[in-house]
Image (cartoon, rainbow, N blue to C red):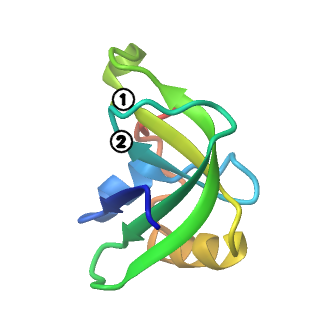
Amino acid sequence: MVDLTVNFDTLHQLYRAYMPFIQPAGLFVATTEGHFLGQEIQIGYRLPGSTHVNELQGVVVWINPLGASGGRPAGIGVKILSDPESHKHHIEKLLSRELASGDLTCTM
């Protein structure tokens, strides 16, 4: 059962949500639902240009509360536990040009 679903419609949205500093991989999911650090969660996500919904199991490792500094959206950072290298490969393949960007993300 998927707890949260997110659609990344653009590469910019995906770039802002990707958390390369989480090892082996992580994604930020905007949400105002209450979550806690260490909570296990099922996420469904769709990458830009795709109709396929990828599913992952993860654990909450980051929380942006409502009113977070820098105008960052409320939500959670999820460390990917299920097949992280595959998720990381697909995301980084799409973001290959953006990963060196200095643009702000949803977390840092």
Judge the density around disc 1: few (<14), some (14-19), many (≥20) Cα neighbours within 10 Å. some
From the top left corner, tell me how far across and down residue 73 is, in percent. 33, 31
Q: Are marks 2 and 1 in contact (CB under 8 Å)?
A: yes
Residue 48 versus residue 98 in the image, above or below: below
**Could you say which is closer to the camera, residue 86 or residue 65?**
65
N-term mark: 2 or 1 = 2
From the top left corner, tell me how far across and down residue 38 is, in percent. 69, 38
Amino acid type shown at disc 2: Ala
Judge the density around disc 2: few (<14), some (14-19), many (≥20) Cα neighbours within 10 Å. some
From the top left corner, tell me how far across and down residue 103 is, in percent. 41, 41
**In what element is the residue under mark 2?**
strand
**Could you say which is closer to the camera, residue 32 or residue 27?**
32
Residue 69 versus residue 8 in the image, above or below: above
Residue 17 is marked as: none
> Going 59% across and 33% down the picture, which residue do you hit?
62
> Going 49% across and 38% down the picture, which residue do you hit?
76
Q: Which residue is mark 2?
A: 30
